[in-house]
Amino acid sequence: MSVLGHRVSAKAIAAMTVLMLVVALLPALSATPTREVTLVARGMAFYLEDDLKTANPTIDVKAGERVRIVIRNEERGLTHDFAFPSARALSKQLTWNQTGQVKFKAPKTPGSYEYFCQPHRLMMKGIIQVY
């Protein structure tokens, strides 16, 4: 095979193609996966999807971890959102039976950080514990 007037073997072209593919995919392969947490808004509180008894749960994350919070509003007549100011994360306002999300990178400094529903901040708030 000829490339720019030089003879190049098929093996060299195949090797170069594989190398370019690996370099192109490297950022996606090396990125930390996003952890997903689903919260349900009901009874003026947040609940984990798999624990509907613990109101406004503490959510544990690793420092710098990528997180996706999915919020589902199951409360008729009330609008809710999810705010996590420490990561500048804010969902859209959700009416009954709507689902929204926020994606953020957890703070790099371990500690306790507040999350809340802006319209109902006094009742609907919890902690994201970064360790």
Image (tube, rainbow, N blue to C red):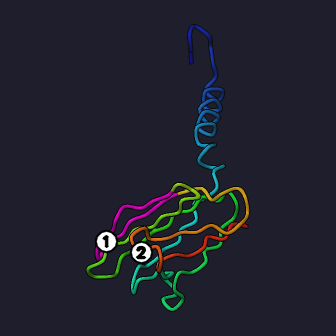
Is 2 colored magenta in this rendering? no
Please identify the quadrant where the C terminus is shown.
bottom right
Q: Amino acid at mark 1?
A: Gln
From mark 1 to mark 2, how far is it between C-alphas? 17 Å
Tell me if mark 2 has few (under 14), some (14-19) or many (20+) residues whose alpha carbon lies within 10 angstroms of its own: some
Q: Is residue 53 above or below residue 108?
A: below
Q: Position of residue 89 (x, y in %)?
A: 50, 57
Name the secondary structure under disc 1. Answer: loop
- Classify the position of the N terminus by image quarter: top right
Disc 1 target residue: 98
Q: Position of residue 71 (x, y in %)?
A: 42, 71
The amino acid sitting under disc 2 is His
Is residue 101 shown in magenta?
yes
Above or below for 94 versus 31: below
Relative to 12, 94 lies left or right: left
Residue sitting at x 44%, y 71%:
117
Task: Name the residue: 37% across, 72% down.
Answer: 80
Q: Which residue is mark 2?
A: 120
Residue 28 placed where, x, y %?
A: 59, 47
Q: Residue furthest top?
A: 5
The quarter of the picture where residue 10 lies is: top right
Residue in the picture at 69% in, 66% down: 130
Q: Residues within 10 Å of mark 1 (few under 14, many from 20)?
A: some
Q: Which residues are magenta?
A: 89-103
